[in-house]
Amino acid sequence: MDGKMLARLGAVVFVAVAITATAIEMTRKETPPEMGHARAVEPARDPLREEQRRCQQLGQAAASDPDCMRVWAESRDRFLGRPPAPAVPTPEGR
């Protein structure tokens, strides 16, 4: 066998394998995955998150609001994984 004949034979075998693989893939029937009944999960109510939203709506005034300062400190502690700081007594609470 010379090189030309070997190249032609290789090409014919390659085309035959490609056609066979295509025919097998086209005749295969795929069943759609069963859709389980998923329940809607309602996230737990987070009062800290609600307070953050309230402070966000206050805008610039939130910088001087003591409740917003407390919320931001608590949020920062939660994010950093630190235990919440003990409540600081205010002068009004004597």
Image: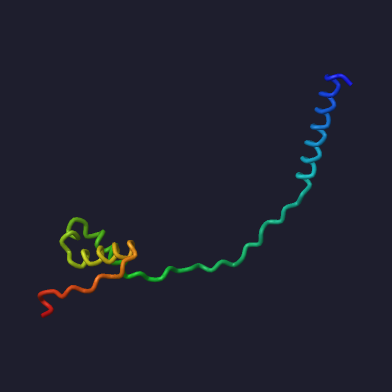
Task: Residue at 25% x, 59% y: name it.
Answer: 57
- Seen in the picture, residue 79 relative to 4 is either above or below; the reply is below
* Quadrant of residue 82 within the rendered picture: bottom left
The location of residue 66, given as percent across then percent down, is 17, 66
Compared across the picture, whether 53 is left or right of 37 comes to: left
The location of residue 2, given as percent across then percent down, is 87, 19
The location of residue 56, given as percent across then percent down, is 26, 59
- Seen in the picture, residue 94 relative to 22 is either above or below; the reply is below
Q: How is the image coloured?
A: rainbow
The location of residue 24, given as percent across then percent down, is 79, 44
Is 15 in front, or is 40? 15
Pick the quarter of the image with the N terminus: top right
* Quadrant of residue 78 within the rendered picture: bottom left
Number of disc labels = 0
Is 34 in front, or is 10? 10
Task: Residue at 35% x, 69% y: name it.
Answer: 46
Pick the quarter of the image with the C terminus: bottom left
Task: Residue at 21% x, 67% y: name it.
Answer: 67
Compared across the picture, whether 41 is left or right of 12 comes to: left
Instruction: Work out which residue is located at the far bottom of the displayed protein and give it.
Output: 94
